[in-house]
Image (cartoon, rainbow, N blue to C red):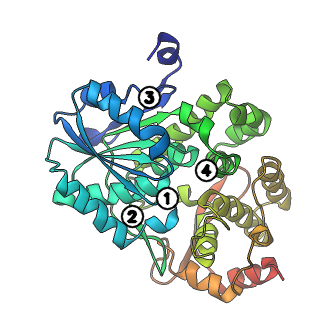
Amino acid sequence: MNNSQSAIRRTVRVDLGDRSYDILIGPGLITAAGAEISSRLKGRRVAVVTDEHVAPIYLDPFMRSLAQSGIEAVPQILPAGEKTKSFEHLMTVCDGVLGARIERNDAVVALGGGVIGDLTGFAAGIVRRGSRFIQVPTSLLAQVDSSVGGKTGINSRHGKNLIGVFHQPDLVLADTDVLDTLSPREFRAGYAEVAKYGLIDKPDFFAWLEKNWNDIFSGGPARIEAIATSCQAKADVVAADERENGLRALLNLGHTFGHALEAATEYDSARLVHGEGVAIGMVLAHQFSARMNLASPDDARRVEAHLAEVGLPISMDAIPGGLPPAEVLMDAIAQDKKVKAGKLTFILTRGIGQSFVADDVPASEVLTFLQEKHPR
């Protein structure tokens, strides 16, 4: 890594006592991975899990970096896509980690986007009753959201991320250079999670995004600033509420609707990817809040305008292939992890940056709202 790369690197600390860890953000971190990992890892062996999209671009330089620091690595390449978050592939990863003879001081590494991170983290959390885990996220969405905070899991036919464990990583390496290889659609999908942090409780950050999103998309200085701000926001919430007993639920703004839409499209990435579901979900959450007289319709329109300006879908009729009836979407919502004692819980808002946890939301109101918004 050259001096200019080191100068612009940012470090965010996730403060969890003796389980605290760093998120390193900046260019050149894949080629510097060996040095960063070896300085923190007592063992000298890792299992690297990646997918067939990431491997041809980043696996070789990552493996070289590890080898240069004396770390032996055993790679495992999985199919790409949301459907990989399954029991079948979980067993494949677990068997691969055991076959690599990963011991207590060694580590399991996720080199990929959110799917690989969630799946690999789950495997690391259960193999040998818990193995050390390192995240090397290669998508914007994973860098600002899924790689931070220790949520891991796979999907079920009943819904998204319903099977998993909390298992914090020991290190996150967010190489901003890799974002230049993302498709425009993938980058936009990740940006939805960036915007989410502004809409939760940082109205000034959302206003900054409205002014600076072009620089973020083009790879200017605003990109690292946006990622670091997002990671710090999540780190603060995770440190205060690691296992989502209260405050952390706010990070699910837009996700209750979004996860239902993903389930309705059977996790077909050609139709809808996670960040797109979150974008539509955040719009729906603001619209529903306005319907419930909690927030001004002007706030919902402002959210719609910004997400549409960056190219994200903002309504259910933007999803190709049609959707099942609103009643089917309600079934998926009823399976959401935030349901307690059978009562619906949503993250709603009183305005931009004024989100809150709403318990016991009337199911009848949600159903009527979905019927109104459902594409005809």
Image point (21%, 59%), residue name: 127
Residue type at mark 2? Gly
User: Which residue bears the numbered disc 2?
Assistant: 153
Residue type at mark 3? Leu
Q: Position of residue 346 (x, y in %)?
A: 59, 69
Query: From mark 1 to mark 4, how far is it between C-alphas?
Result: 21 Å
Q: Quadrant of the N terminus?
A: top left
Q: Nearer the viewer, mark 1 or mark 4?
A: 1
Q: Nearer the viewer, mark 3 or mark 4?
A: 3
Residue type at mark 1? Ala
The quadrant holding residue 332 is: bottom right
Q: Earlier in the sequence, mark 3 or mark 4?
A: 3
Rendered position, 343 above or below 337: below
Rendered position, 125 above or below 136: below
Q: Position of residue 334 (x, y in %)?
A: 54, 82
Q: Tell me whether circle 4 and circle 2 mark residues in contact (CB < 8 Å).
A: no
Q: Quadrant of the C terminus?
A: bottom right
